[in-house]
Structure formats: C-alpha cells, structure tokens
Amino acid sequence: MARLPFREDLAGLKPYGAPQLDVPVLLNVNENPFAPSAELVADIARRVSEAAKGLNRYPERDAVELRGALSEYLAEESGVRLPWEQIWAANGSNEIMLHILQAFAGPGRVVASFLPSYSMYPEYARDTFSSWVAGKRNPDFSINLDEVNRVFNDYRPAVVLLASPNNPTGTALDSDELIAILDASQGMGPRIGSEATSPIIVVDEAYGEFRREGVASALELLDRYPNLIVSRTMSKAFGAAGLRLGYMAASREIIDQIMVVRLPYHLSAVTQATALAALDHRSALKQQVQLLREERDQLATDLASLGLDTAPSDANFVMFGTFDNRSAVWQGLLDRGVLIREVGPAGWLRVSVGTPEENQRFMTALKEVLGR
C-alpha cells in the first residue's frame, strides 16, 4: 500500500492543547471558575428548545440578531457603539483569527507578532500557509516600538497580532503605544503591484473585560484606523468556554472581506441561541468579573509577599516567578491537587484566577512547595 499524502511541513508536530487532568483545583486555562447560574441554564434551555424546532432548516446565515446583541453589549462595556454590520461572530476567537488570516494573509504574505505572546498565533499562520515572523518585547513585556518598526520595514507584514491583555503575561497595551503602532503601520503592509497597503492590526482582547480601571479598549480607535480589528470572546468573562463563541469589530470593508472566506452557515442555530441567552444575563456576569479582578489583585499581592515577581495583569490570570526549576514547582503543585500552567518565558509560571477557595488552596500548596 502506498503511504498517505501527509503534508511534509506537519511532520512530527503535535496538536495544541494544555494538559487536561482530573484534579481538585484547575487553574491552568484561564476559564471563568463560576458555573452558569440556574437562571441562565434555564434561559439557554428555553432558547435552544425554540431553535431545535427549526433544525431541519439552515441557521440564520449572517447571525444578524446575535451581531446586534453583541454590538449592544460592546456599547455598554466599552462605551463604543457600532452598527451590527461592523461586528462579526464565529466559533471561538480561534475561528475569528483564521477568518482574518484567510482573508488578508496566506501564501507569500507575513503574519507577525511580538513574543512572548499567545502560542497559537504561529499555528494560525501555519494553517493558512502564511509566513510567521516574531519580534521581541521589552524585558518588562511591553511592546518595543523600535522592534515594531524593524518588523514593518524588514517584512511588510499583512497581519500583525497583538494580544492586549497579553497572554501569558497579562500586560495590556496603553492607548499611546497602540496609536504609535497604528500610525507606524500606515503604508507598511505588502505591496500590491506598485501600491503600498497598510497591514491589518489585530488587537486580541480575549481578556478585555478584566482590564483595570483607566485601561482603554482598542475599540475606541476603530473610527480613526480602518486597518484595525478588535477581537473578543465569550469564553472568559461570560463563563462560556464550552460555547465557543468569538467575535470581532472592524470596518464594514473588512467585515465584507471576512464574509467572502467564511464557510456557509458556520454558526449553528444552537450556538446563536445559547449566545443570545448569555448576553441577556450580562449584568450578573459583570459581578463575577469584578470579583475575579479583586481576586487577581489579591493573588498578585499574596505572591509578592512570598518574594516572587509578578507581571502587572489586566487579565484573569497572573504570571509569576522566577524559578530555577519551574517544572519542579509545577509538579509540586500538581502533587497537591492544583493544576496551573507551565508556559511563557523561562522561569515563569501562570496561574488562572479561580474562586476564592481555589485561590487559597493554590497559595497554601505553593507555600508548601517553596517551604515558606
């Protein structure tokens, strides 16, 4: 029998995924630790039951009602009101990123980011047959504007991916930094014939709701920069990681191009119904977000009291260290029933914010591991 036609560039690669282990305290994948309320579960059941009556028909293809509801939510959360036509939704922010790269990157084009950052970004580039370029951040994990300009000049990227708050560091871009990047990007994308283009600048705000007071959303800059996309998700603040609903805000011109590459009927009727139910309960979810912010700040204080460094976090996790042997610390916590993430720069570990009880169990276990 002849061999199967595996792609040579995928030889030896393993699929992405954080460890999934059955332990009492799971603080490794930045989930919202609070299960949906009984009221939300009942509302989801009601809406899904209604949607199920029409499952013999394809779902509403362009998810207009859902996009309108997301627009209303963003107006409340960020103070930026956009028409539904400037919102796009997909199966998780993963599919949002693939849509963007399918529409604007691809063979012969460069996708860039600045490390450390989200480890899936190079895989998105690979899966769309795009070239991947990684610049470096400053030692404090902020963006180095000289490095940004170097990447623009040397590679003329089609798409630049900027997580803010950044994963795994938790650090956020401030408005001045983002404006400087957007200004520098003008005309620095791939050439089409003799004409210069501007790269798509994607600000990935998966953890945007957890940002501290005074930290602005990139949504505020959408009307000034037509090459800006802001990506969000319902996986984190909405406690809906199992829903798989991501969305983005951008100019109508960008949304129109995204719709060219999306698969037909990509969002199921059940997904749309569940997301609408979750959006109806956003007031209660805001209270959870505030609690998680407070718990995050307390975690950072507690870690500092042990003599550990923490990266300033605007997300629902804290990166802390540094350790000569971080694997031993990670294993020591696991042995005590606490799973966190060994990810990011050498010597650092990342812990998701859990319930107050889970956070206390983490701190107790960490003190035991460190002998403090």
Image (cartoon, rainbow, N blue to C red):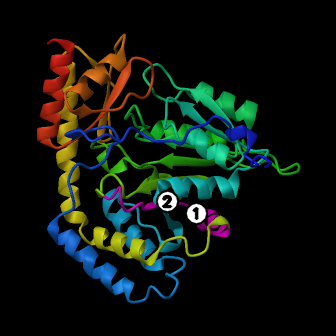
Q: How many other residues sit within 10 Å of disc 1, few (<14), some (14-19) or many (≥20)?
A: some
Place residue 122 in its image quadrant.
top right
Q: Residue at x 19, y 40 (%)?
A: 24
Task: Tell me if residue 224 can be seen.
Answer: no
| Residue 121 location (% of width, % of height) | 56, 41
| Residue 171 location (% of width, % of height) | 39, 33
| Nearer to us in this view, 60 or 218 | 60
Q: Is residue 346 magenta?
A: no
- Three-letter amino acid code of the residue under disc 1: Ser
Q: Residue tagged by mark 1? A: 251
Quadrant where the C terminus sits is top left
User: Which of label 2 and label 1 is nearer to you?
Assistant: 2
Q: Is residue 20 above or below residue 281?
A: above
- Three-letter amino acid code of the residue under disc 2: Met
Q: Residue at x 21, y 45 (%)?
A: 292
Magenta extent? 240-260
Q: Residue tagged by mark 2? A: 248
